[in-house]
Image (tube, grey):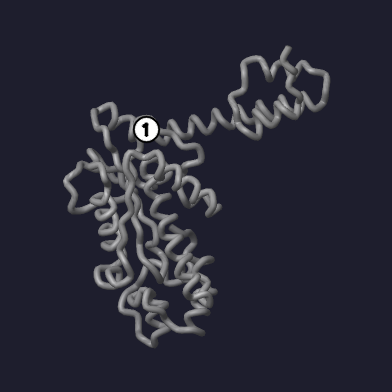
Amino acid sequence: MAKKPSLSDLKQRYLVEGAAVPSGLVSALEADGRAGAKALAKALKARQAENRAEGQRLRHMLKFENELWAQGFVHIAGVDEAGAGPCAGPVVAGAAILPLGYKLRGLDDSKKILDEAVRDELAEAIKRDAIAWAVGWSHHDEIDTINIYQAGLLAMRRAVEALAVTPDYLLVDARRVPGVPQPQQGIIKGDAQSLSIAAGAILAKTTRDRHMNALGQQHPQYGFEQHKGYPTPEHLAAIEKHGVLEFHRKTWAPIRRAMGLSPTQVELFDTAPAKRR
């Protein structure tokens, strides 16, 4: 006769490991007179409610993809960029083609995911599961030459063109990618409304963050691991003390001031931004 699992075994299996809860288990625990059993039942019910809410959120974030899949589009690429606001480093775009009906727990607007390790885990899952994924870059010299908006579009186009599978349709955060033949739709706050765009945004941000972390290792006195090149007070103080580096954006007003030059243009983020991308 099989040994009846203990409350500790049940907690490990269904709360820690996240196994599917068998029908009737919660009711049996609620009927159990032990306080530990009732506490476990309460925790399992809370987990089930959380899972239902997450499932509903993910289904809602597939509404654009579902409409396109129903129309016969198969390979839908979500595209977004990261790094418009910093005064150092590149702007990076990500593109991802997700499988039909794909849902990744926790995938959301990258600005809402504050833990860098969680973003990295999501990026690895996207790379593992996606039909195709790619990133595109536009570096500081191009940003200074063609401006940040055009550089972001260029990075997006490069990401789309780098995909190993040609997409049938593009979903893009708040804009349209120039110079590509695919039909496309720009969605305001798309990384909060489309899982495909959210996936592209995660790829863009994690790629750029790793690049800025590497620059931080090379130039520890600037603190790039913390601010990722944004014009925070700490970053501006480091520039004032140690000078401007090659990969600082020379058309950004704070950088031009540090170089003793007058601003040639009004940049989007002349001081520390309220939110980061």
Whether residue 25 is visible here, answered yes or no, is yes
- Name above or below for residue 257 compared with residue 273: below
Q: Which residue is mark 1?
A: 63
- Residue 165 vs residue 111: left or right? left
Name the residue: 49% across, 50% down: 119
Q: Secondary structure at mark 1?
A: helix
In the rendered image, residue 82, in percent from the top left (x then y), is placed at 39, 57
- Residue 149 vs residue 217: left or right? left
Name the residue: 21% across, 53% down: 178
Q: Nearer the viewer, residue 70 or 100?
A: 100
Q: Nearer the viewer, residue 232 or 38?
A: 38
Name the residue: 27% across, 57% down: 153
- Seen as rendered, the residue at the extreme front is 1
In the rendered image, residue 149, in percent from the top left (x then y), is placed at 29, 62
- Seen as rendered, the residue at the extreme bottom is 260
In the rendered image, residue 64, in percent from the top left (x then y), is placed at 33, 35
Residue 131 figure quarter: top left
- Seen as rendered, the residue at the extreme top is 1
- Name above or below for residue 27 compared with residue 16: above
- Name above or below for residue 170 compared with residue 22: below
Residue 234 figure quarter: bottom right
Whether residue 176 is visible here, answered yes or no, is no
Q: What kind of residue is marked 1?
A: Lys
In the rendered image, residue 48, in percent from the top left (x then y), is placed at 60, 27
State which quarter of the image contains the C terminus.
bottom left
Name the residue: 53% across, 66% down: 226
